[in-house]
Image (cartoon, rainbow, N blue to C red):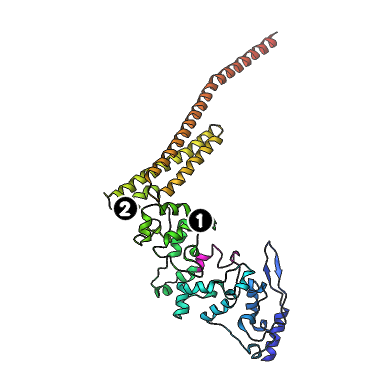
């Protein structure tokens, strides 16, 4: 048996050295580590490990698993402090032995509070407090050996890969049934405004799961926290919301902040024509609040139509061959006012809303008037050319007729 293991080590050493991709293209060849006995049995683990960030930092198998790396036979290789496959709780302590050390993490610009954050999370509470081994540990999200940087597109923690990483558990109906959780979050997120921005537009400023729930401290925000969580990205809207009447209700937990109107995983921007219906979820028809929602809807619908009309007017100017620089500048002014309408909706300042709506309407009508004049001049110019072309064709016809007469006279003489 000892001879077979030693022979296997020689075979592994004779294999072509594995390669990994490097930044900027190309491959980096990893020299065979024939003096490292672990590869005698675990060549596949080493191949995965050297592709990750830990190998670049000089970490070796025995740093996590113990044992004697110089040995190539059993049981010598596993003597001393050897841990073959640590359980989930032990993995947290093992990873934390380095990642909780500020002095060690500082040089890499990494935080050192992940374990402390994990203990506050729902995952950590289940795993560390209740010893529920269905809860995830570090390696469930980061892998055990091929641990990649989060800016590596192959990493499970890459922005567009995070939802799928979370979905590995949260789409498992059997597992989620233990905790009474739904399994449709990923599908709902994928079709949401956030999901479209992240996956379709590749906008990494858009939140994935961890943007709202946190990473190691993963927890769903409470009712009173939702507005603050959304406000980390939607700063101006958050300020407007805080100045309106709904903010106090959100702080008291009487409404679920932003998700009361926009949804959570299937977040959407409420269309202009559905504003009153959205208000009607809480405010009965005939009440002052419902009437206010109807009034806001009418203003937003009007502003939306005016903005589209202004955009069409610029297209008409372009087709008429006119310079559109000034028109484009005025359109952007209208667009700025329109975007401010979206903010003002959240504090229910009707006077300010009407002012912005009038500004959009005024610019739109001016641009439409300019486009109408340009099109009229275009048609007038075309009509003016009709007699010019007629005169030119008539002159050409008379010239040809005179030429033919001269030719006939010449042949007759």
In the rendered view, tell whether residue 320 sits above or below residue 3.
above
In the rendered view, tell whether residue 398 sits above or below residue 86.
above
Q: Is residue 337 left or right of residue 153?
A: left
In the rendered view, tell whether residue 33 sits above or below residue 329.
below
Residue at 47 percent of width and 38 percent of height: 310
Mark 2 burial class by Cα count in 10 Å: few <14, some 14-19, many 20+: some
Our reading of the magenta stretch's main secondary structure is loop
Q: Earlier in the sequence, mark 1 or mark 2?
A: 1
Observer-nearest residue: 165 or 18?
165
Location of residue 397 in the rendering, given as x and y in whole percent from the top left corner: 60, 17
Location of residue 296 in the rendering, given as x and y in whole percent from the top left corner: 36, 46
Q: Which residue is mark 1?
A: 197
Q: Which residues are magenta?
A: 148-165
Residue at 44 percent of width and 53 percent of height: 239
How many marks are shown on the rendered structure? 2
Q: Which residue is mark 2?
A: 280
Residue at 31 percent of width and 50 percent of height: 289
Could you say whether the residue bearing mark 2 is in a helix, strand or loop? loop
In the rendered view, tell whether residue 204 sits above or below residue 35.
above
For residue 159: magenta? yes
Q: Is residue 258 left or right of residue 145?
A: left
The answer to whether residue 133 is seen in the rendering is no
For residue 353: magenta? no
Alpha carbon distance from label 1 to label 2: 29 Å
> Which dot, 1 or 2, sits closer to the camera?
2
């Amino acid at each position: 048996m000892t001879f077979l293991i030693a022979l296997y080590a020689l075979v592994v050493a004779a294999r072509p050295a594995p390669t990994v991709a490097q930044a900027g293209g190309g491959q980096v060849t990893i020299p065979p580590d024939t003096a490292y006995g672990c590869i005698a049995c675990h060549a596949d683990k080493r191949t995965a490990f050297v592709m990750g960030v830990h190998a670049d930092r000089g970490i070796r198998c025995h740093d996590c698993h113990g044992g004697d790396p110089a040995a190539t036979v059993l049981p010598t290789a596993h003597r001393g402090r050897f841990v073959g496959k640590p359980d989930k709780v032990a993995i947290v302590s093992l990873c934390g032995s380095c990642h909780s050390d500020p002095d060690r993490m500082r040089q890499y610009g990494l935080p050192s509070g992940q374990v402390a954050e994990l203990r506050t999370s729902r995952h950590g509470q289940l795993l560390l407090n209740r010893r529920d081994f269905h809860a995830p540990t570090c390696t469930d999200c980061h892998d055990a050996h091929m641990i990649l940087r989060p800016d590596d597109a192959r990493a499970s923690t890459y922005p567009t890969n995070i939802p799928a990483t979370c979905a590995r558990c949260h789409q498992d109906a059997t597992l989620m049934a233990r905790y009474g959780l739904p399994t449709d979050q990923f599908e709902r997120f994928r079709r949401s405004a956030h999901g479209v921005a992240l996956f379709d537009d590749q906008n990494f400023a858009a939140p994935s799961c961890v943007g709202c729930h946190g990473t190691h401290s993963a927890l769903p925000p409470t009712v009173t926290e939702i507005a603050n969580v959304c406000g980390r990205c939607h700063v101006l809207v958050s300020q407007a919301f805080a100045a309106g009447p709904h903010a106090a209700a959100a702080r008291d937990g009487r409404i679920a902040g932003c998700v009361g109107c926009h949804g959570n995983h299937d977040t959407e921007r409420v269309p202009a024509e559905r504003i009153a219906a959205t208000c009607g979820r809480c405010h009965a028809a005939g009440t002052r609040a419902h009437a206010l929602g109807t009034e806001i809807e009418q203003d937003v619908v009007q502003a939306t139509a005016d903005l589209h009309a202004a955009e069409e007017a610029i297209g008409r100017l372009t087709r008429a061959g006119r310079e559109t620089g000034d028109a484009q500048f005025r359109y952007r002014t209208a667009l700025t006012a329109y975007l401010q309408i979206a903010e003002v909706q959240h504090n229910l300042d009707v006077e300010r809303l009407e002012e912005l709506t009038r500004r959009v309407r005024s610019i739109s009508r001016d641009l439409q008037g300019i486009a109408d004049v340009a099109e009229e001049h275009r048609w007038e110019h075309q009509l003016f050319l009709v007699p010019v072309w007629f005169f030119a064709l008539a002159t050409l016809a008379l010239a040809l007729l005179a030429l033919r007469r001269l030719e006939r006279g010449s042949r007759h003489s």
